[in-house]
Amino acid sequence: MSSKFKNELTATFSKNTYLFTFLFFLILYTICDFKFYETEGVHLIPLHILALIAGVIFESKKITKTWTTAFLIGIISFVLTFSLGLFLYYISPNAKFDLMLILNVSILAWPIAFFIIYVIYSRIFNKKRIAPQLTEGTTLILSISMIYWVIDNGLARFDNIILRIFLIIVISLSLFSLFNAFTKIYLSDTIKLILSIWSSIIMMFFAIDNLHGIFYNGNIVSTNELVQGTYIAIQYFLLGVSSIYMIQNFMMLIGFLPSWKMFFFVKYSNKVSELKNEHIDRYSDTQVSKSDSKFCILFVGTIFFFNYYFEIVPRQFIIWLTFITFPFFLMTYNHFVKKK
């Protein structure tokens, strides 16, 4: 029995080497962090930074289907930060060598290095995979969220020509996405291009607003530190999950802006043409059902209404949380509907 158990354990370890190695380093870090907290009174890495990295790793596993990428990038980024610490010590004339100090600084700098390297890696090697396949349903939920954002900010009450134009654009494109979600109109390349660009604009818009909200709320001290810390951690986790898609959508929009390439019109025209094709290719030809569209409006609209009325959490938080969780609720809804 013990031999069989040993063989099964060995087989499990060999199949999940990177996962077990990651857990080993996690336990090692926990021990070091505990000792550091006892002596210094602070953690090696703040909770929100750990949450950010957790979000990136979570999405990494989802994209690459393996732990290898996140593990290797984690090792490489730490080696780079540690090497940088040694280099800075070497070039400092009066610095006293302190291995623990260099190690602690390396741990503090590691999350930033990990995040940057992972985003660069994803952009170069997973370009196609990190361009999420968009559907009419995705654009619908984004449009509903955009309308909620406008209402929650009170922009509809402002008498300003620029804001009025902004509202007209938002309402027009939102109605257009609503029309496509509830009809079986043929998704031509032009329609897919419009819906894809509109989706990218909203994602980038929310990304900027989310970053502002996170940094604004990050220093809030609540009487209930556990609840406040958990709330901030979830915010950073959601930021980590969405960060790669933020980068991709930014790259899919920035290419349309005129630059010095305008002097080489042929090259610029070719670039824009390629970018248009990327937008068209990433938009699914599969049209969502009316049932899913109704559920989306009812579910998302209800959440946004209650949050607007009772002011439970900031709009950035509820919007991104809805983005991440809605597919699960839709899947659950369809599961029970099909059972009937």
Image (tube, rainbow, N blue to C red):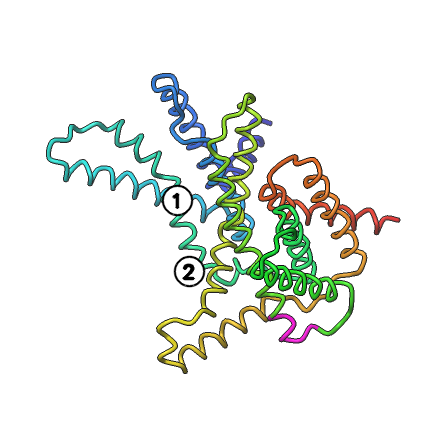
* Res 325 quadrant in image: top right
Residue extending farthest to the top is 38
In percent of the image, x 44 and y 60: which residue is there? 125
Q: Kindly indicate whether the residue at mark 1 contacts the one at mark 2 (C-beta within 8 angstroms).
A: no
Please rate how many residues cluster around mark 1, counting C-alpha atoms within 10 Å: few if below 14, some from 14 to 19, many from 20. Answer: many
Q: Secondary structure at mark 2?
A: helix
* Front-most of residues 45 and 207: 207
Q: What is the quadrant of residue 88 in the picture? A: top left
Which amino acid is tagged 2?
Ile
Extreme residue toward the left, this view: 93
For the residue pair 241 and 225, the one nearer the viewer reads as 225
154 or 68, which is in the foreground? 154
Is residue 192 found inside the magenta-colored segment of the image? yes
Amino acid type of the residue that numbered disc 1 sits on in the rendered structure? Phe
Q: Position of residue 270 (x, y in %)?
A: 45, 79
Q: Which mark is residue 114?
A: 1
Q: Which residue is mark 2?
A: 124
Earlier in the chain: of badge 2 and badge 1, it is 1
Q: Residue at x 65, y 34 (%)?
A: 312
Quadrant for the N terminus in the image? top right
Residue 26, image x and y in percent? 44, 31
Q: Position of residue 85 (x, y in %)?
A: 24, 37
Q: Residues within 10 Å of mark 2 (few under 14, many from 20)?
A: few
Residue bounds of the magenta highlight:
187-193
Question: Does residue 104 appear to the left or right of 237 in the view shown?
Answer: left
Tag 1, which secondary structure? helix
- CA distance separating discs 2 and 1: 15 Å
Nearest the camera: 160 or 224? 160
